[in-house]
Amino acid sequence: MEIEIGRAKRARRAYSFDDIAVVPSRRTRDPEVVSISWTIDAFTFDTPVIAAPMDSVVSPATAIAIGRLGGLGVLDLEGLWTRYEDADAELERIRQLDPAVATAEMQRIYAEPIKPELIRARIAEIREAGVPVAGALSPQRTQEHFQDVVDAGVDLFVIRGTTVSAEHVARDREPLNLKKFIYELDVPVIVGGAATYTAALHLMRTGAAGVLVGFGGGAASTTRLSLGIHAPMATAVSDVAAARRDYMDESGGRYVHVIADGGLGTSGDIVKAVAMGADAVMLGSALAKATDAPGRGWHWGAEAHHPELPRGNRVAVEQLAPLEQLMFGPSSHADGQVNLMGALRRSMATTGYSDLKEFQRVEVVVAPYHSR
């Protein structure tokens, strides 16, 4: 149903994760018999967690750690790790910045050019550990650096921006032709963000293996304040899941994975993302709270240091537990921030579902909730 905002404009009602809740069914299970694994292309992961390509979340070391825990860590190939030989020193500088000058100083730090040899070195470091290797570039940088990424040997390639379309229009440069680009690559590509049925369907038609839903916003983003753009995530994930269903019919059965990216601060949000149709989730701030995350109590994304229009902040986050404990417990917090995967298992068991695909069919209700 559409709502009349004024005589010249009508809008559809959209819902965030806080607006919905899952409903138990007639059956329950033991959490131990629930599967939370998922498969994309030739890769199967024990947990549906992709660590977001943000310098405060993923370093080569944490990408390796997340891989060993059954998830996928995506390294930002435009971040500090590919600009500086000693990225740890720059991370420490960012952590120590006065809030009054943090944005301007981060713009200066990230003005250092990206070095192809560091792209290759960082990817090689992760590969040597024997875990799946994933790296991310923005659409603007993909054509410039993708060959170095592919030559270095990534298993999955991520193209991630505030919003990514299959029909970008540019005046003074040749835009990235996603369909041609993906067709010519030998590795599966995950692309996004997208927040509507139509945008996601067009991305699926490019041959993408997965579509990121949302704008990767969350705690560190000011995109809504800066650009007026916002994606209520429950509706966005459901719309993109509908595009996946229709694209399967259109393509004769090709399945494109839906990955929720943004608005996922607690285990309950992860549960509801899967309930709305997500196959996996991309986590930023939720993992930045690990005591061994690169940010060490601080969190920021690429939007925070955009040279012309910053759309994010460096924000302080509470350090709660080591990464493994944050994901698998045990937890001494009752607010859904620790033991993220244990909570997902328990919710699926409580509602009677045995795997993620089944859980996408769980009943949900609209039940707006404002905590504390």
Image: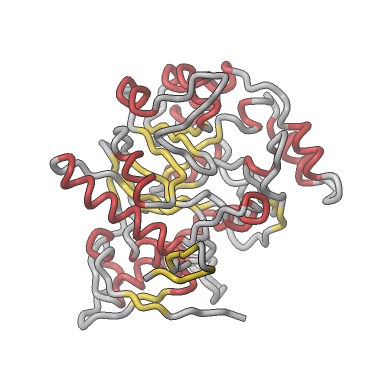
The image quarter containing residue 333 is bottom right
Left or right: residue 259 compared with residue 95? left
How did the renderer colour the structure? secondary structure
The answer to whether residue 312 is visible is yes
The answer to whether residue 53 is above or below residue 288 is: above
Q: Residue at x 37, y 23 (%)?
A: 181
Residue at (27%, 65%) from the top-left corner?
Answer: 359
Q: Is residue 189 above or below residue 162?
A: above
Q: Residue 274 placed where, x, y %? A: 35, 61
Is residue 130 in sight in this rendering? no
Image location (x, y in percent) of residue 263 = 52, 60
Picture quadrant of residue 251:
top left
Quarter residue 345 falls in: bottom left
Q: Quadrant of the C terminus?
A: bottom right
Q: In the rendered view of the protein, which quadrant contains the N terminus? A: bottom left
* Front in this rendered view, residue 209 or 341: 209
Residue nearer the viewer, 212 or 340: 212
For image coordinates 51% across by 79% down, the residue present is: 369
Which residue is painted at 72% across and 35% down in the image?
Answer: 308
Give how far across and how far down residue 252 sits, in percent: 13, 41
Residue 306 percent location from the top left of the image: 68, 37
Left or right of residue 14, residue 318 in this image: right
